[in-house]
Amino acid sequence: MNQRERAGVFQQEFFMSALKSKTKPDVLEEMVEVLVRTGRVKNKRIVLEAIQQREVLGSTGIGKEVAIPHCRTLAVSSLCVVFGRSKKGIAYGSIDKKPVKLLFLVVGPPIEKTNQYLPLLGRLCERLHHAKTRNRLLEAEDYKSFLEIMEGGE
């Protein structure tokens, strides 16, 4: 991801280095709560329902200890990405049945002028496919380190 992209979607207020939740529903609520506290989400319940509806289609736990829960909703006016990390892991119902340690919650409006939603999901999957990136994210000490990892190459 280039500097312009990361500056637009990865914001310090959405960096959660130590998730407290231990279950999938709780972690999703914890991450959405960050969007509520920062004023980015108008209605927490609507966002949670949209995420849950997406999960019904298939788990967003993509394997290799990674989940990318995502939805489009009128409850946000612009694309938001919350990064969360759980060093112990969360039972998430991932496709490989392993606990999830790295989560990227992506919430966007139904229509966006910049059309970043689907390309962003693709780039996240591509970056997180690499074990080196995942391992570095698990060890990132702060937001600055996180940005450097997401921007860097393999």
Image (cartoon, helix red, strand yellow):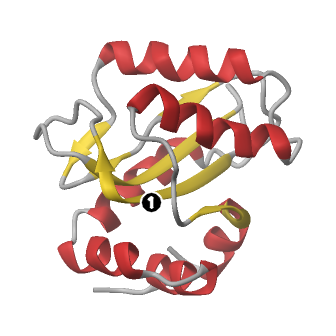
* Residue at the extreme left: 96
Q: Nearer the viewer, residue 55 or 85?
A: 85
Considering the numbered disc 1 on the image, is that residue within a helix, a strand or a loop? strand
Q: Residues within 10 Å of mark 1 (few under 14, many from 20)?
A: many
Occupied quadrant, residue 138:
bottom left
Q: Residue at x 63, y 44 (%)?
A: 115
At which x and y percent is residue 46?
A: 70, 15
In this picture, residue 148 sits left or right of residue 137: right
Please determine whether, in this image, residue 115 is positioned above or below residue 16. above
Q: Residue at x 23, y 30 (%)?
A: 93
In this picture, residue 26 sits left or right of residue 9: left
Q: Residue at x 10, y 40 (%)?
A: 96
At which x and y percent is residue 137?
A: 39, 74
User: What type is the residue that disc 1 sits on?
Assistant: Arg
Q: Residue at x 68, y 48 (%)?
A: 80
Q: State how many labels appear.
A: 1
Occupied quadrant, residue 117:
top right
Please determine whether, in this image, residue 67 is positioned above or below residue 15. above
Q: Nearer the viewer, residue 113 or 4?
A: 4
Occupied quadrant, residue 79:
top right
At which x and y percent is residue 18?
A: 52, 62
At which x and y percent is residue 131?
A: 19, 73
In this picture, residue 147 sits left or right of residue 134: right
Q: Which residue is mark 1?
A: 85
Please determine whether, in this image, residue 8 is positioned above or below residue 108. below
Question: The C terminus appears in which quarter of the rendering?
Answer: bottom left
